[in-house]
Image (tube, rainbow, N blue to C red):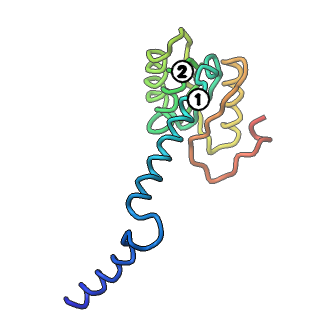
Amino acid sequence: MDTLRMVYERRTSQYSSSKPGFGMLGKIGAVLIGLCLGLWYFQDSNLDSLKGKRVLVTGASTGIGEQLAYQYASLGCRVVVTSRRLEALTKVTKRCGDLSPRNYTHHAVVGDMENMTSAKQVIEQTVSLLGGLDILVLNHITSQPITPSYLC
């Protein structure tokens, strides 16, 4: 037991503020600087530039994809969501409509992004529905790489 205590004390003394390095105050300062920079970045970014953008979010029936769709809709984007489950997508598009500051119709396209033929059809349907595509959010897992030739 005493041996363990000695090892613990020796290891913790290595991180004391008396040695050169950040110490606790330096670490707190680094975090505060990071927070200030993050706040400055987001205040300076112009989210109004997203208004009217045409967005496709894959894997949007739940989780991160769903939340991204809501965020884009609330910023005034025209959103198309895709996944393999129509019921979940219908709920997402309804909520996007509720959050949207404009009267955009948001769309759901059912597709399996694992299948490259299906992925290409999803892109084509999105372009047809929105008249183009400005932002593509790939939020799905696939075992195959998605190359530009499949998307064009």
Give residue 117's quadrant in the image: top right
Q: Position of residue 123 (x, y in %)?
A: 69, 30
Q: CA distance from mark 1 to mark 2?
A: 16 Å
Q: Is residue 95 left or right of residue 121?
A: left
| Neighbour tally class for label 2: few under 14, some 14-19, many 20 plus, Cα within 10 Å | many
| Residue at image location 47% in from the left, 68% down from the top | 21
**Image height of 98 relative to 22, above or below:** above
| Residue at image location 36% in from the left, 72% down from the top | 16
| Residue at image location 46% in from the left, 64% down from the top | 22
Which of the two residues, 89 or 52, is positioned nearer the viewer here?
A: 52
Q: Tag 2 or tag 1, which sits nearer the N-term?
A: 1
Q: Position of residue 135 (x, y in %)?
A: 66, 30
What numbered label is drawn on residue 100? none
What numbered label is drawn on residue 75? 2
Q: Amino acid at mark 2?
A: Leu
Q: Position of residue 98 (x, y in %)?
A: 44, 15
**Image height of 64 relative to 130, above or below:** below
Q: Position of residue 80 (x, y in %)?
A: 59, 25
Q: How many marks?
A: 2
Return the residue found at the far left: 1
Q: Which residue is mark 1?
A: 44
Q: Is residue 146 left or right of residue 23?
A: right
Give residue 81's quadrant in the image: top right
Q: Report the quarter where the C terminus lies.
A: top right
**Image height of 98 relative to 111, above or below:** above
Q: What secondary structure is found at the residue carrying circle 2?
A: loop
Q: Amino acid at mark 1?
A: Asp
| Residue at image location 58% in from the left, 29% down from the top | 44
